[in-house]
Amino acid sequence: MKIELKNFKHYDRLSEETYCFTANIWVDGTKCGYAENRGFGGETSYHNEGTDASRQLIKQAEQYCLKMPPIVWQSSVSGKDLSLDMNLTHYIDELVSALVKKKDEENIAKKMNKEMQKGILIGTDNGQDIKYQTITFKMPLRDMWEKHPDFFKKTLVEKLEKYKPKGYRLLNTNIPQQFLN
């Protein structure tokens, strides 16, 4: 069974204790309901579309989720593993978390790509935790390496050496190979 959320809208500014969102629920390619959470810490709610077919699809999705393995995580207090039986509400929450994470990663990538046009990005990108320094010039990066290739290469090498002890590396994907050797 394929359970999806489409027309997903996340309201970050309204998210306090939980993600504030609205989305349509699709089961096996058919729209059958909607889900929402107001972001105040309450449970995610979902509803069918009011037709017999949508009620049946939601019921099948609920039964399907009950057969899934529980959600397991480690307690930050005791260090012990805790588990929570899976149900459709928790499954929707897992989908929402994945969608929000994907959107955040896309936004970070978009921001970094924009900054790469302006300067050299040196830093770390260990999964979610991305830290970097931007070394800018008085002209766009491409103009810098085209008009002043020797100075650009010298600056690149110096900055990489300077930040290497911190475990930083070059994050740019737009610098020609000739400057990376």
Image (cartoon, helix red, strand yellow):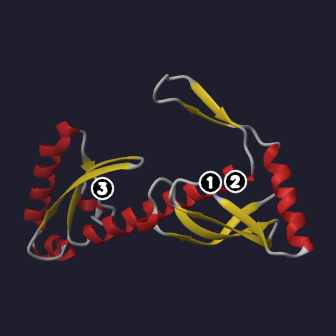
Number of marks drawn: 3
Are the two marked residues, 2 and 1, in contact with CB atoms closer than 8 angstroms?
yes
Query: Splitting the image into 4 quarters, where does residue 149 fall?
Result: bottom left
Give percent across and percent down for residue 11. 48, 69
Is 67 in front, or is 41? Answer: 41
Q: Which residue is mark 3?
A: 171
Residue placed under numbered mark 2 in the picture? 89
Q: Tell us which disc is closer to us: 2 or 1.
A: 1
Instruction: Give the Cα distance between marks 2 and 3.
Output: 39 Å
Q: Quadrant of residue 57?
A: bottom right
Q: What residue is shown at x 74% (from left), y 38% (from top)?
A: 69
Point out which mark residue 43 bears: 1
Q: What is the secondary structure assignment of the residue under circle 1?
A: loop
- Residue in the picture at 24% in, 53% down: 132
Residue drawn at (78%, 49%) of the image = 65
Residue at 10% x, 57% y is 155
Label 2 or label 3, whichever comes before in sequence order: 2
Q: Is residue 60 left or right of residue 134?
A: right
Q: CA distance from mark 1 to mark 3?
A: 39 Å
What amino acid type is highlighted by mark number 1? Glu
Badge 3 marks a residue whose secondary structure is loop
Question: Which amino acid, by three-letter code, is at mark 2?
Answer: Thr
Amino acid type, label 3? Leu
